[in-house]
Image: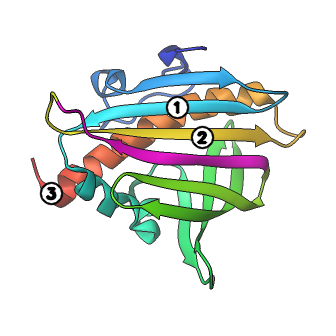
Amino acid sequence: MDNDLSLIDTPDEQLSPDITPEELAAVTLETKKLEKRHRQIQAQISLPFSPEQIWDVLIDYEALADFIPNLAKSERLPHPESIRIEQIGVKNALFLKFSARVVLDMVEDFPHAIRFEMVEGDFNAFAGSWKMIVAEDQPGTTLAYTLQVCPTRLIPVKAIELQLGKDLPRNLIAIRQRLYQVYGE
């Protein structure tokens, strides 16, 4: 199991001015190699908010693209049997623009977990969860994001690992910043 936060701050990508190295240090990141080209990546952060507050931010699916870095679109799609979300991530690198699209079915277990699985998109597999974990001995909630991903043959696995290693901590910091915007300090 790799636990390498050095992937986050590479010379070719500077931190945005509103995210400090100290904030990124508050995020733990683990990557596991699974069978073949499958990877599991988990990122987590401790937040001084209740599970219900975090829940409200996470299930506002249409607003996620307003504050999650590199998420260009997040839209709820009509579906008779489930909560279905279309998301498009966009990344600019070396004068090129890359995008990836996923359509996810969401399963909500208020206020503990939100599980998702890709039903259509640009990966061979893309599934995971958000979990809100309350510790008995300390205030606040740990927000844990777990993703199991398998890129298509056109995308090198190492590129996905490196990119997610940079993006997931930033996403958790963005969620924390959104919680402060919505609920204050």
Q: Earlier in the sequence, mark 1 or mark 3?
A: 1
Of 97 and 105, nearer the camera is: 105
Between the C-alphas of marks 1 and 2, the distance is 6 Å
Residue 7: give x, y in percent of width and height: 55, 19
Q: Which residue appears at 18% of the width and 39% of the height? A: 140
Q: Is residue 59 above or below residue 6?
A: below
Looking at the image, residue 31 lies above or below residue 73: above
Answer yes or no: is residue 133 visible.
yes
Give the residue number, with chain letter if any, for mark 2. Answer: 147
Q: Could you tell whether 20 is left or right of 140 in the image?
A: right
Secondary structure, mark 1, is strand
Instruction: Work out how far the residue at label 2 is from the one at label 3, CA to CA, in angstroms.
Output: 27 Å
Residue at (28% x, 21% y) in the render: 22
Few, some or many C-alpha atoms within 10 Å of disc 3 (few <14, some 14-19, many ≥20)? few
Identify the mark nearer the N-term, 1 or 2: 1
Q: Are marks 1 and 2 in contact (CB under 8 Å)?
A: yes
Q: Position of residue 108 (x, y in %)?
A: 46, 63
Of mark 2 and mark 3, the one earlier in the sequence is 2
Q: Is residue 61 left or right of residue 154?
A: left
Q: Is residue 42 above or below residue 4?
A: below
Q: Which mark is residue 71?
A: none
| Residue depth check, mark 1 versus mark 3: number of the one nearer the observer | 1
Which quarter of the picture shows residue 83? bottom right
Quickly name the residue at label 1.
Answer: 42
* Residue identifier under label 3: 183
Which amino acid does the dot numbered 3 rest on?
Tyr
Look at label 2 and name its amino acid: Leu
- Numbered range of the magenta stretch: 124-136
Mark 3 element type: helix
* Quarter holding residue 105: bottom right
